[in-house]
Image (cartoon, helix red, strand yellow):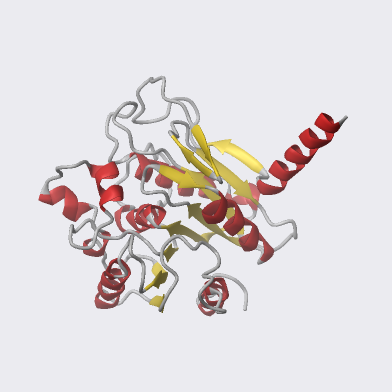
Amino acid sequence: MKKIIVLVFILVSFMSKSQIILPLYEGNIPNNIISSKQEVDKGRGRITGITIPQLIVFLPAKPDSLRAAVIICPGGSYAGLAMDHEGYQVAQILNKHSIAAFILKYRIPDDSFMTNKQIAPLQDAERAIQLIREKSIEWNINTKNIGILGFSAGGHLASTLGTHYNEVMIENKNNISLRPDFMILLYPVISFDKSIAHLGSRENLIGKNPTEELVNHFSNELQVNSQTPITFIIHASDDNDVPVENSIRLYQSLQKNKVPVEMHIYEKGGHGFGLHNKTTTDEWFDRLIDWMKMNKIIKG
């Protein structure tokens, strides 16, 4: 009897976290090689070895007019994904504000099962926004209010989609726009300039000895133009893993190109604080909601 109760509790707990789990692709996954590689649960919400990308769908319970949507990219140095505090927790709080949330369980770059590991995460981000726009009627989504949110290396992926969306890496017969309408970046990896880069993320994505051209291509502060989506940025000055200079350079580039941007830099907080920076009573998520209202992404 005890075993049954525990099993029911686990099932209910899981169902409360994820409403729908969808494979990102129908049929063959692009850029994949058949491999014995398997996904590994490292505990505390961290998973590695992701070979089958998925979209985990959280739809608000309350019926609403066409709602905004946010694709969530957890961080993990392009070596794994922090699915709990940079995924599930964020999706749940977005739902409380009637915002549809989609956790992107993207592939981890790996030469052992990819023909080109550098583009695999971007392919998955492109497919995520394409899929949401394809299912926008079914999910009651406003196709002009679909954004992407990323933490750390997930912030690099989010900003890569925001600056490289014209590089179509997936099949797109219907020419669905792959451009996010806004970006939300939390202590993001932005630049692969060695002086400020998070070297683990850089090496995992583009290798140990990348060309200068490749470094510049994936240094997203260099890829901003006037069509880059409006952006909201959070960072801490004492982040010793991803220097705050990453966010500052992106902010400056967005301003130079006259792209609306709001940035909050906390004195302390370090790296990886997720929803709550314990060094301050200020909640960055409240600032985000204010910004989304100001930009008419959600109702004021």
Residue that appears at 50% across and 37% down: 24
Residue that appears at 41% across and 24% down: 37
* Image quarter of the N terminus: top right
Q: Nearer the viewer, residue 50 or 229?
A: 50
Q: Nearer the viewer, residue 240 or 251?
A: 240
Residue 194: percent from left, percent from top: 18, 57
Residue 18: percent from left, percent from top: 65, 45
Residue 10: percent from left, percent from top: 73, 39
Q: Is residue 130 left or right of residue 251?
A: right
Q: Is residue 216 left or right of residue 35?
A: left
Residue that appears at 33% across and 60% down: 241
Residue that appears at 40% across and 79% down: 267
Evaluate whether residue 141 shows in this view: no
Q: Is residue 205 above or below residue 276?
A: above
Residue extending furthest toward the right: 1
Total marks drawn? Answer: 0
Evaluate whether residue 16 shows in this view: yes
Q: Quadrant of residue 12?
A: top right
Q: Is residue 4 above or below residue 125?
A: above
* Image quarter of the C terminus: bottom right
Q: Quadrant of residue 289?
A: bottom right
Residue 217: percent from left, percent from top: 20, 53
